[in-house]
Every structure is written in C-alpha cells, then in structure tokens.
C-alpha cells in the first residue's frame, strides 16, 4: 500500500524553526517528485514547495522563499521541509503529496506558530 | 501567478441530483488541471488529472472536462459520500495554484 506519513509538527514561537518529515512506503520513492502543500485552519490549499526525484529541480512559493528548504533522502525514503523564521501566517496543516499528480497525500502535520 | 476561480462557492443539492462545478483560470493552463475532493478532517484526494482523466479508484460518476481557461467537474448522480469540498489545481505554470474551493452540501 502506498503511504505517506508526515511528522515534526508542533507549537513554535514566531521566528523559530521546525523540520517536517514525510516518510514514504509502498512505492519506489526515488522515482517520484514530491510536494509540500499547506492548509491554514478553515482555509483552502496552498502549494508550498516541489522537489524533483533527483533533487535537481526545486521550486518554492513566494510566501516561503528564503525561509523554507525542501530536501529528500532517497536512501531513507524520506522528504523534508526545514522551516526557519516562522511567522504567524505559517500556521497550517502541512501535507506531503506524491508526484506530478499529487496522489496520494499524507494525513498532514499541524504547525502552530504562536507566542 | 495563475489565479483559479471556482464557482459556485457553495452548492446545495440532494442525493441523486447532478452536480456541476466550475473552475476558471486567469490564463490558459492547457489541460494541466486537476480536481481534488476533501472531507472534514481528511487529506485531499485526487479525483481527476489532466482535465478529464479519472484517478485510480474514482467512480465513473465523476467526470472532468474543459481546456484552456474553463473547466468543469461533473458528478452525475450524487451519493451521500460525495458531499465535501472540491478544489481545482493548475500545474501548467509555477507556482502551482489552487482554486478557493466549492463546498458541496446536502440540501
């Protein structure tokens, strides 16, 4: 069964840092690009970042550029999102999603930025 | 950045009825448009990719159409489990963008 499991969310103060992880199983992780998408409480979906299968191509939303870093470890079947200089508006559930077709998605991990 | 506008914001229908959801792009996205379903407390699920292709395991009552700037998601006969929020997404240009969503509620 294809599965994505996010972890690493939690409560952090403004200006703080957090590292999210997405553990993949049930498929050849190294063959797929990956994405991070977030959803603020009660709001819609916002694409955050993309990484190609080999990490050669990376994109970020303007809202996180310069603060967030996406990476992956194909040997560990894992995707990461390093989030620095966190702001109140970064509060959201963060999902990882597989491939160009964003299928499937993980269950999400909640990041709360608050003092 | 390509803006996707979904309409209506809320659609109130009864089980068995036909649902038609619209997604309009601010510029052409060719056929690089997807539709997702999200139920409360759950992650989104891919329904349609490349405008008209049903994802694996999606029932035939879901269909997508359109190209360029105007797209439609049709649910031919609503089942109770279809009441949810639906999002469109374009992958034609970076950044990828989502519509604001259409809430399909029971009338």
Image (spheres, helix red, strand yellow):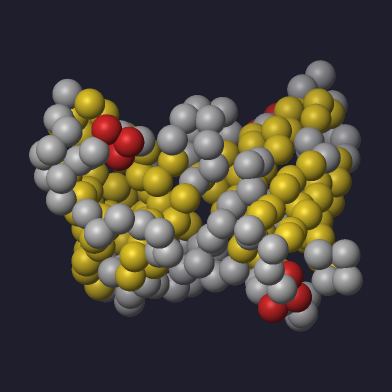
Viewport quadrant of the C terminus of chain B: top left
Q: Residue furthest left?
A: B17
Q: Is residue A60 visible?
A: no
Task: Answer left or right for A16 relative to A31.
Answer: right
From the top left corner, tell me how far across and down residue A39 is, in percent.
Answer: 57, 39
From the top left corner, tell me how far across and down residue B51 is, in percent.
Answer: 31, 68
Q: Quadrant of residue B35?
A: bottom left
Q: Is residue B49 visible?
A: yes
Counting the numbered discs, the total is 0
Q: Quadrant of residue B7?
A: top left
- Please report the residue visible at 44 percent of the width from the left and 73 percent of the height from the top: B92
Task: Answer left or right for B50 relative to A28.
Answer: left
Q: Of residues A2 and A83, which is closer to you in this image?
A: A2
Q: Of residues A2 and B24, which is closer to you in this image?
A: A2
Q: Residue furthest front?
A: A1
Relative to B3, residue B43 above or below: above
From the top left corner, tell me how far across and down residue A80 is, in percent.
Answer: 81, 56
From the top left corner, tell me how far across and down residue A112 is, in percent.
Answer: 73, 28
Q: Quadrant of residue A23?
A: bottom right
- Please report the residue visible at 20 percent of the width from the left and 50 percent of the height from the top: B75
Relative to B101, residue A79 above or below: below
- Please report the residue visible at 80 percent of the width from the left and 30 percent of the height from the top: A10
Relative to B74, residue B33 above or below: below
- Please report the residue visible at 64 percent of the width from the left and 37 percent of the height from the top: A93
């Amino acid at each position: 069964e294809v599965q994505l499991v996010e972890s690493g969310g939690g409560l952090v103060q403004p200006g703080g840092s957090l590292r999210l992880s997405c553990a993949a199983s049930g498929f050849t992780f190294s063959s797929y690009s990956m994405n991070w998408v977030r959803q603020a409480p009660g709001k819609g979906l916002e694409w955050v970042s993309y990484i190609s299968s080999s990490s050669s191509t990376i994109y970020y939303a303007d809202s996180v550029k310069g603060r967030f870093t996406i990476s992956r470890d194909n040997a560990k079947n894992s995707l990461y999102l390093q989030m620095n200089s966190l702001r109140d508006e970064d509060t959201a559930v963060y999902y990882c999603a597989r491939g160009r077709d964003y299928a499937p998605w993980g269950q999400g991990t909640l990041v709360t930025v608050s003092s | 950045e390509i803006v996707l506008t979904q309409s209506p914001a809320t659609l109130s229908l009864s089980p068995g009825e036909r649902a038609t959801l619209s997604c309009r792009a601010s510029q052409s996205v060719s056929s690089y448009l997807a539709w997702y379903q999200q139920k409360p407390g759950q992650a989104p699920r891919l329904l349609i990719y490349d405008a008209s292709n049903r994802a694996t395991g999606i029932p035939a009552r879901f269909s997508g159409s359109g190209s360029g700037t105007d797209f439609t998601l049709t649910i031919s006969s609503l089942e109770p489990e279809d009441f949810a929020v639906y999002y469109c997404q374009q992958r034609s240009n970076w950044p990828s963008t989502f519509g604001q969503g259409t809430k399909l509620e029971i009338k």
